[in-house]
Image (tube, rainbow, N blue to C red):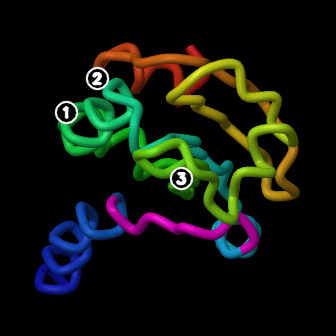
Amino acid sequence: MRALAALLIAALPLSAQAWEHDLAAAQKRAKAEKKLIFADVWTEWCGWCIKLQKDVFPSPEGKAALATVVPVSLKTQLRNGAPTELKHLEERFQVEGFPMLLILDADGNVVRSHAGYLPPKEFAAWVKGK
């Protein structure tokens, strides 16, 4: 029994990093896991987007927050500003700036949104709805 508990605890950080890259897959997983979706709408040219991905998501606070949701990465533009196949999501989610952080229900409806960077502690609180 202890070995099983240790295995489950060891696997926790891996599940926190199980990012989806397709909204439909994230919705399917959210329904199965009975979780909300965290969507990171970003572009390759956005410095704050990259900082969020490098400094916030892998931080202890970021990992803990992301373990409570189904995270999905939605890159809408390339470095040169060219659109990706996900560009249409900018209009759907009324993107005001990048990064655009969204909490969605399992049907893809916006629960709350935030345009811009959040440091680790603020990010964790925002994901939790505080």
Labels 2, 3: front one: 3
Mark linked to residue 75: 3
Instruction: Name the one closer to the observer, 89 or 120.
Output: 89
The earlier-in-sequence mark between 1 and 3 is: 1
Q: Which element is circle 2 on?
A: helix
Q: Quadrant of residue 4?
A: bottom left
Residue extent of the magenta highlight: 17-24
Which residue is drawn at the image coordinates 29% and 45% (left, top)?
Answer: 63
Tag 2 near tag 3, CB within 8 Å = no
The reply to whether the C-beta atoms of the residues labelled 1 and 3 are less than 8 Å apart is no
Three-letter code, disc 3: Lys
Relative placement, left or right, of 4 versus 106 is: left
**Quadrant hosting residue 9:** bottom left
Write the residue at 79% across / 57% down: 106
What's the mark number on residue 55? Answer: 1
Kind of element beneath mark 3: strand
Of the two numbered discs 1 and 2 on the same chain, state the one appearing first in sequence.
Answer: 1
Pick whichever, 32 or 102, lies toward us.
Answer: 102
Q: Secondary structure at mark 1?
A: helix
Establish if 96 lies above or below 108.
Answer: above
Question: Main SS of the magenta segment?
Answer: loop
As drawn, 22 above or below 38: below
Q: CA gap, disc 2 to disc 3?
A: 21 Å
The residue at which mark 2 appears reads as 120
Residue 60 image position (x, y, % from top left): 19, 37
Q: Is residue 20 magenta?
A: yes
Which residue is at 50% across, 17% downward?
116
Q: Position of residue 42 (x, y in %)?
A: 51, 41
Q: Which mark is drawn over residue 128?
A: none
Dots 1, 2 in contact, CB < 8 A: yes
Give left or right: position of 68 versus 5: right
Q: Which residue is drawn at the image coordinates 40% and 46% (left, top)?
A: 79
